[in-house]
Amino acid sequence: MSLNTIEHLIIHQLHKEPSGPARVALAPAALAITPAAQRLVDQLCEQYGTRNGKGFGQFADDETLLMPQLVRRFSQENSLDFTGFSRELMAELQTRMEAEPLASGGYVLVAQVNNAAMRFIFIALLSEVIGTAVNDELQVIDSIHLDMQHLRVAGRIDLGSWQAGGERYVSFLRGRGDVAGYFKQFLGCLDVKTPLKETQKLVKGLEAFANEQAIAGDERDELFQRAHSYLDALGEGQGEVALATVAEQVFPTAPAQLQAALENEELGINDGFVPDRRAIKPLMRFKANAPQWKVEFDRASLRSGAVIYDKYSDTLVLSNVPEELKQALLAQ
């Protein structure tokens, strides 16, 4: 049984060769939700959900942009039906593609879908691929079908989050070298890149990766040391984070593993932000407050024995007490 309920589905076509004009072929009406249509949407939604390298954001605060106007007219005001909504989208996409020389056409799927997680509009550009089949006469023939394995351009608008005033209700596939930048513009999306929050998510992702890979001891210290050094240098020089490069610098033995972990959709990290140097301190230091004390120490002090944590008694033992503090304690 499918976890996705398709409310509306339509497929149009955009004809365009690289550096050429774009031409639209519109479907006359929405599609019936057949088992084949359900499988198509289910596969695309699953692939989109598991794909790395997404951008996240919200509609840009620009009333001249078409996408937020169309979504409002369709989903809130009910002044535009689904077929009309999809056709307006196609006109806007045609304009954006014509301004992008390297963009190529394909089939444009537009769907409104509900599942347990969200109610959303899903838009994907699909290309054809030639496969191989065997006909009734047991002859080998070419079989043209949609390329489901290489979803290259797609986006999703979380209607519930948008209506609730969320900040990250639009997502899209970035593609290599941001080749799908025109599609982000088509979505009317403004990347949400708050350096402090993005850096905190990155640190959280690094810690989660170390836990999942059971990286401990000196190896864990070295991993976080590399991460801190690299991100601190980026922050000082106002360089922007690229998760693929972070993975190469921080975990050179298997960068693809770390990149996949950092690009997990649940983390929702956006590339292209300058690290907040305050937020990377937890990579090197522990800091905590309690009602009657504060403490801060380097991660390496746990390895050296200068700080000992006893999990059974839930106590910290601090060694090498400074002379000034020692005298104050003795006086007390």
Image: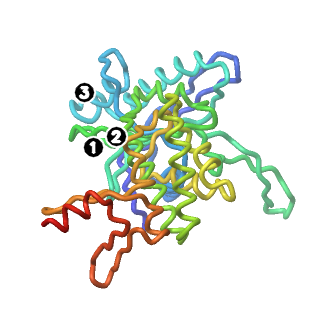
* Residue 246 in sight from this viewpoint: yes
Q: Determine the residue positioned at 13% across, 62% down.
A: 291
Cα–Cα gap, marks 3 and 2: 25 Å
Q: Earlier in the sequence, mark 3 or mark 1?
A: 3
First in residue order: circle 3 vs circle 2 = 3
Q: Badge 2: few (under 14), some or many (20 or more) residues near its Cα, within 10 Å? A: many
The secondary structure type at the circle numbered 1 is: helix
> Residue 241: which numbered mark, if any?
none
* Vertical position of residue 89 compared to residue 312: above or below: above
Quickly name the residue at label 3: 79
Against 146, is 218 above or below? below
The secondary element bearing badge 2 is classed as: loop
Residue 152 position in % (x across, y down): 60, 40
- Give the x, y percent position of residue 167: 30, 38
Q: Between residue 288 and residue 293, name the one nearer to us.
A: 293
Contact check, label 1 and label 2, Cβ < 8 Å: yes
Q: Which residue does the numbered mark 1 point to in the structure image?
A: 161
Residue at the image position 57 percent from the left and 27 percent from the top: 25
